[in-house]
Amino acid sequence: MKVTIHIWDLPHRLFHWLLVASVIVCYITAKIGGALIDWHGRLGIFIFGLLVFRIIWGFIGSTHSRFVTFFPTVPRIVAYLKGSWQGIGHNPLGALSVLALLSVLAIQVGTGLFANDDIAFEGPLFNLVDKSFSNKSTRWHNISFNFLLALIGLHLVALIFYRWVKKTNLIVPMLTGKKKIPAALAKAAATNHVEEFDALRFILSVIISSTVVWGVLGGITQLYPVQGAQQTAQSPSSF
């Protein structure tokens, strides 16, 4: 017998689907290029904010959104492979996939901040580095995207496998927040203290992530002209 429980909080689901939409549009704008490349950059900054938010929410969010709840430790992975793992959130292999996706996206965003296309686009922090470093960042931005595509492909294969082989729909719970699980698991979960969604923590996470994005894109770039002027003043004049 299965029962329905609430597992994924609203911020978790918003992050997931906003990230999906942003990555898709980022891919389209990069492929089309031209005037849309600016939107590629803007969406990259938005993804940066989403990633910062997810890191914060992974520590102060509701129970099943916290990294400590699903972090794929060796004992958990071994138990899952042996078929003895018991849980209601991300399973250990799914957790590995989540962390891999977040890591590659972080590399994408980090390299994109300094990248350029030798035509019209320059990352928001392009002026903080020399052209050689920017070119290397651009190269790693392109290489890491291939890894991202591979991970997305594996993710989609896993969704299909669970839907048609294990008869478990993983998409609906990420839309509704609700999941059907065995009654025994639900009873065990009910005995544990579960942190529910808290609006104040959500607002705090949004404020912090927005501040971090501003600090990187606004604060640093506003300081740069001052630093550049100081360096120019200190360097000897050439005739």
Image (cartoon, helix red, strand yellow):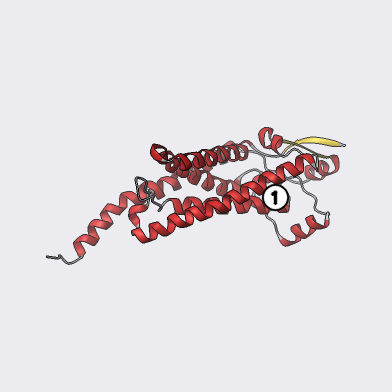
Residue 112: x and y in percent read 44, 51
Toward the right, the furthest residue is 1
Report the label total. Answer: 1
Residue 7: x and y in percent read 71, 39
Q: Determine the residue positioned at 39% across, 39% down.
A: 34
Q: Check the image and report above or below for 82 versus 177.
A: below
Q: Determine the residue positioned at 77% across, 48% down.
A: 87
Q: Nearer the viewer, residue 6 or 113?
A: 113
Q: Check the image and report above or below for 206 versus 114.
A: above
176 sits to left or right of 223: right
Q: Nearer the viewer, residue 70 or 100?
A: 100
226 sits to left or right of 189: left
Residue 40: x and y in percent read 45, 41
Report which residue position mark 1 lands on: 94
Name the quarter where the C terminus is drawn: bottom left
Residue 185: image quadrant is: top right
Residue 193: x and y in percent read 73, 45
Three-letter amino acid code of the residue under disc 1: Gly
Which SS class for mark 1? helix
Label 1 crowd bin: few (<14), some (14–19), many (20+), radius 10 Å: some
